[in-house]
Image (spheres, rainbow, N blue to C red):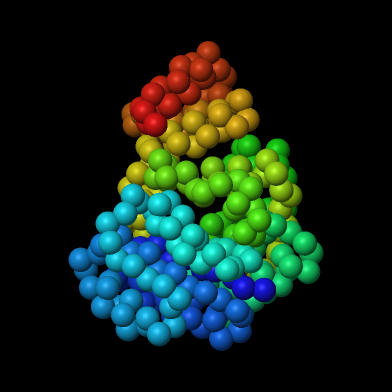
Amino acid sequence: MRTGVVVPSYNQGKYLERALISVIDNKKNANIDIAVMDGGSDDGSVEIIRKYEDYLTVWKSEKDGGQAAAINKGIELLKDCDYYMWLNSDDEYESDVAVRDITSFAYMNKYDVCYGMSHFIDQEGSITGEYPTEPYSKNNLGKRCYLSQPSVLFSRRAYEKVGPINEKLRMCLDYEYWIRLSQDFSFGYYEEYIGSTRMYDETKTSTLKRTHLNEGIMILNKYFGKVPMEWIVAKYLEENDNLVNRIIPVRIMELLLLGKRKNIVDKAIEELNY
């Protein structure tokens, strides 16, 4: 089976080479096509891509519509693949057999979507923790995202059925996509480490917390018709810094916010203006 790996990137020259090497090492053990979609970087990324272009199926460096647009474009350029993954340019695969193993797991068990375990790593690549993955439950997906994006694989059939990734989203584009996939497919949980997510101060997750919360609330409200209280509490605390360091039992906080729940959800969606 052929797996397409899309690497979206923009001014990530500091980590891009490690990401590319990670994918290329996997190419030695699996049938992989690689698409690098750079958003027109000016930090030396293009020189790094050219250094490895003999291993790439296709690459482009041009202004695009953001991360989701870059991933969609990469998938469409790799039309002959049976499965797809994307690896952000500051992430890495755990081993040189990661792609082979999760593709084999999906194929042997006839899964159109499957995901593995994942670590958090720091700027140097050292493991700092573990992403909280868990066995698949569609219901629990309506409470939290327990799929780690670099460890997820989906079939061409699933992509064609569900459609492309939502290009309006900046932060929760992966979470929204997993939820859409879950409307038509069951997921397989592969209990081995596949991808590593790099966490550092400059990541979008660190710098765009408000957008992350707003998008998550909007998505959950749209697909499940309700937003779990932990999202409501997080949103409220994000807007009220003076409460963050006060010791307030979570259950009391939830009770206090029950009456404000709808207003908080409406405000989050209004702020996005998508």
Query: Seen in the image, is 105 located left or right of residue 12?
Result: right
Q: Is residue 142 above or below residue 80?
A: above
Q: Is residue 199 left or right of residue 46?
A: right
Residue visible at 49% across and 31% down in the picture: 218
Q: Where is the C terminus found, in terms of image quarters?
A: top left
The percent coordinates of residue 103 (x first, y second) are 67, 70
Q: Give me the residue at 62% from left, 73% from top.
A: 2
Quarter in which the N terminus is drawn? bottom right
Residue 125 seen by the camera: no
Q: Is residue 140 depicted above or below 156 in this figure?
A: above
Question: Residue 28 appears at what percent x and percent y?
Answer: 56, 86
Q: Is residue 186 visible?
A: yes
Q: Nearer the viewer, residue 262 or 247?
A: 262
Q: Is residue 176 above or below residue 102?
A: above
Could you tell me which residue is drawn at 56 percent across and 56 percent down? 148
52 or 247: nearer the eye?
52
Q: Nearer the viewer, residue 140 or 88?
A: 88
Whole-percent x, y for residue 65 in the image: 33, 49
Residue 97 occupies quadrant? bottom right
Viewed as shown, does residue 4 lie left or right of 17? Answer: right
Q: Residue at x 66, y 69 (%)?
A: 102
Count up the numbered dots: 0
Q: Measured along the vertical axis of the image, is residue 91 above or below residue 213?
A: below
Residue 239 position by quadrant: top left
Q: Residue furthest left?
A: 42
